[in-house]
Image (cartoon, rainbow, N blue to C red):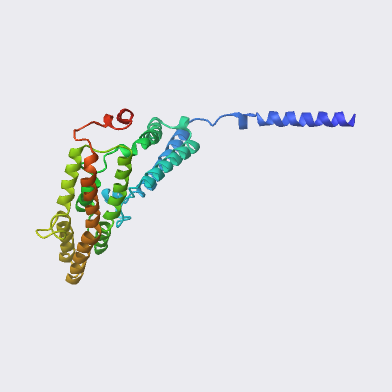
Amino acid sequence: MRVMFGRTLASGAALLSLLAGCGPAEDAAPKVTPETIAAESQKLTDYLNAEYEEELQMSPEELTSQGRKEQYGALDDRSEAAAEADLAWRRTSVADMKSQIAYDMLNEDARTSYDVWELELARAERSAPFRRHRYIFARGGAHTGLPNFLINFHRVDEKADMEAYIARVGLIDNALDQLLERARLSGADGIRQPGFAYEQAIGEVKRVTTGAPFTPGADSALFADAKGKIKALQDGGKITAEEAKGMTAAASAAMTTEMKPAYDRLGAWLAEDRANASPAAQGVSALPDGTNYYS
């Protein structure tokens, strides 16, 4: 009798506990009100703002393009490993957003932001298998883009800005070597830009590295830009004549001892690999798995 009575008490307690757990306080879903919608929408805005800032910090060049001077002496990592790391970061970001934000409690604008962030991941996932399909040294590639970036976006207001400029010139070789490695990998996969694009790139390499300090003659576009920015610092009283002389020499050295050899390596590869390219212009659908890449 005692055992059965004990079991009865235990069953009754469990039932009471179960009923209590199903009470109004715990069973009801969070009440959706204009206030909760506004709060959840703001939570998403704050989250995406923080994620965008984190993403921005991964690209020194984008920071500069937006007028900011963090990481002013650095260039972007152009390796395949960096591209994969970026994709992994984006996966984590979207997963965290989904776990932290209640989509059903967002206003219309916030839902659009949520959808776009998720869509960016989907696009990145779809394009990842085709990273090597892109023509790395076609028109607008980094071989011309990096000098243009320094000329047009790297603002020099103080001595430290020019020191960062010179540091970036010294990093162009690493950037080009990363891209050259990717171009070689693409070539091994049977993916090459058309022959005419090789010729165009060879001509662009020559133009970038023609003129002082690379060759005799008038200043190259990049050296002229560096000297002009150094002169502006001196004219503004930001540096002395001696410092200006030293900076000019440092810029020249970075261009001739670090930047120029990388362009020579690139030019040599372009000339050698040109024979493997299609002599006729072809669309991307002619590449391996090109139809899916085009789609």
- The mark total stands at 0
Q: Does residue 295 appear to the left or right of 256 in the view shown?
A: right
User: For residue 107, which quarter of the picture?
Assistant: top left
Residue 50 location in percent, x, y? 40, 45
User: For residue 249, which quarter of the picture?
Assistant: bottom left
User: Does any portion of residue 157 appear in the rendered image?
Assistant: no
Tell me the quadrant of the picture where the C terminus can be found.
top left
Depth check: give the residue in front, 291 or 144: 291
Q: Does residue 48 appear to the left or right of 159 in the view shown?
A: right
**In the figure, 95 relative to 16: above or below?**
below
Residue 235 location in percent, x, y? 15, 65
Residue 203 location in percent, x, y? 15, 46
Tell me the quadrant of the picture where the N terminus can be found.
top right
Which residue reaches farthest bottom?
A: 242
**In the figure, 90 relative to 3: above or below?**
below
User: Does any portion of residue 132 appear in the rendered image?
Assistant: yes
